Amino acid sequence: MATVTFDAVSCVYPGADRPSVDRLDLEIEDGEFLVLVGPSGCGKSTTLRMLAGLEEVHSGRILIDGQDVTDAPPKDRDIAMVFQNYALYPHMTVAENMGFALKIAGVDKQERAERVLEAARMLDLEPLLERKPKALSGGQRQRVAMGRAIVREPQVFLMDEPLSNLDAKLRVQTRTQIASLQRRLGVTTVYVTHDQTEALTMGDRIVVLKDGLLQQVGTPRELYETPRNAFVAGFIGSPAMNLLDGTATAEGVRVGGLIVPVERGLDASGAVTLGVRPEDFRVVPAGEPGLEIAIDLVEELGADGYLYGRTTGEHPVAVVARVDGRAHPGAGETVTLAPNPEHLHLFDGESGERLN
Ligand SMILES: Nc1ncnc2c1ncn2[C@@H]1O[C@H](COP(=O)(O)OP(=O)(O)OP(=O)(O)O)[C@@H](O)[C@H]1O
Ligand SMILES: [Mg+2]
């Protein structure tokens, strides 16, 4: 078990005109499950690969348990990595695949067998130990890849989109298994995904990256309730937060015909983005303060529904609101939506930085 520190770490690939990871500062606690999330190309894999020693650090330092490993080869870092393509050896059985790293490390046969069996029990793989990978389902292969990492009892687990080859249902199941297994083992884990739902459900803390730059670090709740900028606001949460262009006036923020009173004094002439989560809109009687929305579609999900529409008027803006799944207005109708004043998010219209 170990802490991990990134100290102003940058990676510039040969020939690139800007860093793929740009002065990353990050402290990962012992035993923590940290999720790196962000859109494709934001630098998640690069960050993980630098920690594993597979990518050169251009500047800055990486520490594992206080030890500077910036220039240490991968084998000296006591890290186990699980990749997206599990890369199992096809000619070896499950047991041999799982024990291979131990064999290379010179662990004797008896101990190897014990550690493989223990991991296999944890992962429900015991009945499959003598099979070859081709006779396994995708989810089972994924668990073998996990098992191979677990038997090494490393200080740190690194996982790069390990679930992306699984179908939706299996992904949900497996992510719960990985999260609970990690908690049981207590091994510091850095987990990469581009799926914000995975990040929210699995991580103790989440790091959001964009263009190689750290946007925010925090617990799932912190990122959801107080995103530091409009990018994080739009990225975390599904359906995404509504981000509406507005202007600051003396009375509050004006968005279309709606004036949203705000407590904090805002720059009276500034452009402001108003953020409202879908669940923070409420359908109110016509004529009450709110945004007039023409409904395009209502997606019914049983208990809840999502209403998709556009603001009426000159420059229509797409809006999504959560509604009662049983009683809601229908496509083609026009409704008034009022945001819950307790849960408003305000961002600078230019920089995107949070204002409230
Ligand atoms: N070997 C390389 N040489 C040059 N540029 C690279 C190399 N690997 C990655 N990059 C670039 O670095 C940036 C970050 O890539 P990285 O693989 O870390 O992204 P990612 O966040 O893991 O994306 P994805 O979700 O698509 O896997 C991208 O712009 C990518 O094109
Ligand atoms: Mg990647």
Image (cartoon, rainbow, N blue to C red):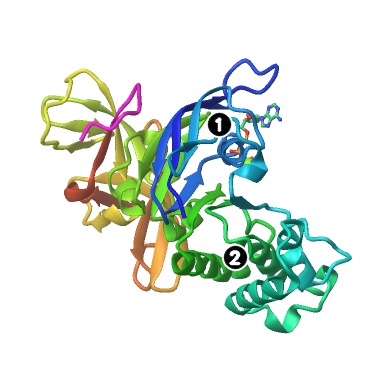
Residue occupying the far bottom of the picture: 127
Q: Element at badge 2?
A: helix
Tag on residue 171? 2
C-alpha distance separating marks 2 and 1: 34 Å
Q: Is residue 24 magenta?
A: no
Any part of residue 22 in sight: no
Three-letter amino acid code of the residue under disc 2: Arg
Q: Is mark 2 within 8 Å of ligand 1?
A: no
Highlighted range, magenta: 347-356
Q: Position of residue 252 (x, y in %)?
A: 15, 32
Residue at left offset 80%, top offset 79%: 130
Q: Position of residue 66 (x, y in %)?
A: 43, 39
In the figure, 209 relative to 78: above or below?
above
**Residue ID for mark 1:** 70
Whichever of callouts 2 and 1 sits on the residue coming sooner in the sequence is: 1
Q: Position of residue 79 (x, y in %)?
A: 59, 50
Q: Considering depth in this image, is 67 or 252 the residue closer to the camera?
A: 67
* Res. 229 image quadrant: top left
Residue at left offset 63%, top offset 59%: 163
Magenta segment main secondary structure: loop
Q: Considering depth in this image, is 341 or 184 the residue closer to the camera?
A: 184
